[in-house]
């Protein structure tokens, strides 16, 4: 295998491990050797440039593809188009689009998304109407684009035209969310009530405003909700943190099945009402309802986050009694429980005796506990085991480095960070989203 071929294998490896910067460094080495770019790698490298906002490097790749003639490839051209669109350079994106000898639906969608990102809905609509073939993604993006600028009339007109086979739960969600974001809760409720997957939509996403509107509608119309609807209401209110309403509905139900018990226990657990979650689990047992693996996962998680060590161990021991086999997530809760309580040796012994291979969550819980209690020796031992299994994650090295830093062992901390980079790992920043005053925000 030639040196260039070896470098391309390394590039693919870096990209598969989400290390785009390292991939581009390797590509620069190939360019310095005067070698041509391998066609199959070009789109991946261009996407890497876009993700890192390294547009000069991306332009150089575009120039190379033009020189080699690979810019006529639909995948390469689409990736170039997407890069310019992400930068907000719609003029150059459109030039690439217009000069493409052939286009697929992804190419059309990329150009439309570029227009919509800049709120140019007229250009997007003109292109949309010229499309020879549309996908569900195309329809959803167009509808979302008009809801974003508050043109709900046009969004609804497009929604009504969506072919039946392409009208997915995402399409309905975009419309309901669009009305809700623009303050028209009445219209949001009307669309929601027509939605075939409505229970899945609201109950699973925990959209409190829309869910409450639906609940009020049920009450106003004098409809007697069935077991399934009541379960959904309990689940929705519990997920949204309205535990008082969730419990009120729960306690007024003529029959309470295992699904509903799980919803109420999970709701209290995820909102920090750990002791109450344990009490509900005991009430469930007293009512003669058999807990399942979901029940145990919720209540064990509550015990871990609430520091209820003995309660958690007692409940875990009951899994055998109810014929429920503990899975990796149940063991993860117990390891987290012991680790938070400072019982690190017990936690590590449990990891080593697991009936299955520890996953990233297990190792992360153990190393997180080591960091919490500044236990470097055990963390080093755990890292040795992790390396022997062939596992690798930026979070492991970050946690170990932070443990060293907390002990002011700066050389070890830096050594660990460098080891992470040598392995081609890059710390991936976390993100979350929330809905506030009708708008969706990413943090």
Image: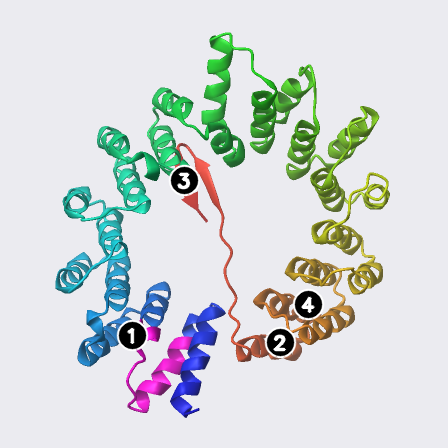
| Residue position for label 1 | 57
Identify the residue position indicated by label 4 in the image.
403
- Residue at position x 70%, y 51% from top? 329
Q: Is residue 46 left or right of residue 123?
A: right
Tag 1 near tag 2, CB within 8 Å: no
Question: For the residue carrying disc 1, how many other residues have a C-alpha within 10 Å: few (<14), some (14-19), or many (20+)?
Answer: some
Q: Nearer the viewer, mark 3 or mark 4?
A: 3
Residue hosting label 3: 440
Magenta highlight range: 23-42
When the figure is inspected, residue 124 is found, relative to residue 395, above or below; the finding is: above
* Horizontal relation, residue 301 to residue 344: left or right: left
| 3D distance between C-alphas at marks 2 and 4 | 10 Å
Q: Crowding near pointer 4: few (<14 within 10 Å), some, many (20+)?
A: many
Alpha-carbon distance for marks 1 and 2?
A: 30 Å
Could you tell me which secondary element the residue under label 4 belongs to? Answer: helix
* C-alpha distance separating marks 3 and 1: 32 Å
Q: Earlier in the sequence, mark 4 or mark 1?
A: 1
The disc at residue 369 is none
Q: Position of residue 419 (x, y in %)?
A: 59, 79
Q: Residue at x 26, y 52 (%)?
A: 109
202 vs 320, nearest the viewer? 320
Name the residue beneath numbered marker 2: 416
Residue 331 appears at what percent x and percent y? Answer: 75, 53
Q: Nearer the viewer, residue 35 or 406?
A: 35
Sequence order check, earlier mark of 1 and 2: 1
Q: What is the residue that sits farthest to the top in this orientation? A: 222
Of mark 3 and mark 2, the one earlier in the sequence is 2
Position of residue 111 measured from the top left corner of the image (x, y, whole percent) = 22, 54
């Amino acid at each position: 295998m030639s040196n260039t071929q070896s470098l391309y294998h390394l590039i693919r490896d870096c990209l598969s491990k989400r290390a785009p910067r390292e991939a581009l460094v390797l590509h620069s080495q190939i360019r310095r050797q005067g070698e041509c770019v391998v066609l199959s790698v070009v789109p991946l490298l261009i996407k890497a440039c876009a993700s890192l906002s390294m547009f000069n490097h991306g332009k150089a790749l575009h120039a190379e593809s033009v020189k080699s003639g690979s810019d006529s490839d639909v995948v390469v051209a689409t990736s170039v188009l997407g890069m310019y669109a992400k930068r907000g350079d719609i003029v150059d994106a459109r030039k690439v689009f217009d000069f493409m000898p052939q286009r697929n639906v992804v190419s059309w969608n990329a150009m439309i998304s570029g227009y919509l990102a800049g709120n140019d809905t007229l250009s997007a609509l003109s292109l949309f109407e010229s499309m020879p073939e549309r996908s569900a993604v195309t329809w959803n993006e167009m509808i979302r684009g008009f809801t974003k600028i508050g043109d709900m009339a046009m969004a609804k007109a497009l929604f009504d035209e969506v072919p039946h086979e392409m009208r997915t739960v995402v399409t309905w969600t975009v419309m309901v969310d669009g009305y809700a974001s623009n303050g028209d809760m009445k219209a949001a409720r009307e669309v929601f009530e027509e939605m075939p997957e409505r229970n899945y939509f609201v109950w699973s996403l925990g959209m409190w405003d829309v869910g409450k509107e639906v609940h009020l509608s049920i009450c106003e119309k004098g409809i007697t909700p069935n077991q399934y609807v009541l379960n959904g209401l309990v689940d929705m209110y519990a997920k949204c943190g309205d535990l008082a309403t969730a419990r009120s509905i729960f306690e007024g139900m003529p029959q309470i099945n295992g699904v509903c018990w799980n919803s109420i226990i999970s709701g209290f657990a995820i909102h920090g009402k750990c002791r109450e979650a344990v009490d509900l689990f005991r009430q469930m047992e007293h009512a003669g309802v058999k807990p399942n693996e979901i029940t145990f996962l919720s209540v064990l998680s509550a015990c871990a986050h609430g520091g209820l060590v003995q309660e958690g161990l007692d409940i875990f021991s009951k899994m055998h009694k109810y014929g429920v086999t503990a899975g990796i997530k149940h063991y993860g809760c117990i390891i987290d429980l012991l680790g938070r309580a400072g019982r690190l040796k017990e936690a590590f012994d449990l990891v080593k005796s697991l009936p299955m291979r520890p996953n990233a969550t297990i190792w992360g819980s153990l190393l997180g506990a080591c960091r919490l209690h500044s236990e470097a020796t055990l963390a080093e031992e755990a890292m040795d085991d992790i390396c022997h299994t062939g596992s690798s994650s930026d979070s492991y090295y970050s946690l170990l480095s932070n443990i060293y830093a907390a002990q002011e062992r700066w050389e070890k901390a830096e050594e660990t960070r460098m080891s992470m980079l040598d392995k081609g790992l890059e710390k991936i920043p976390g993100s979350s989203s929330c809905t506030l005053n009708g708008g969706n925000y990413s943090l």
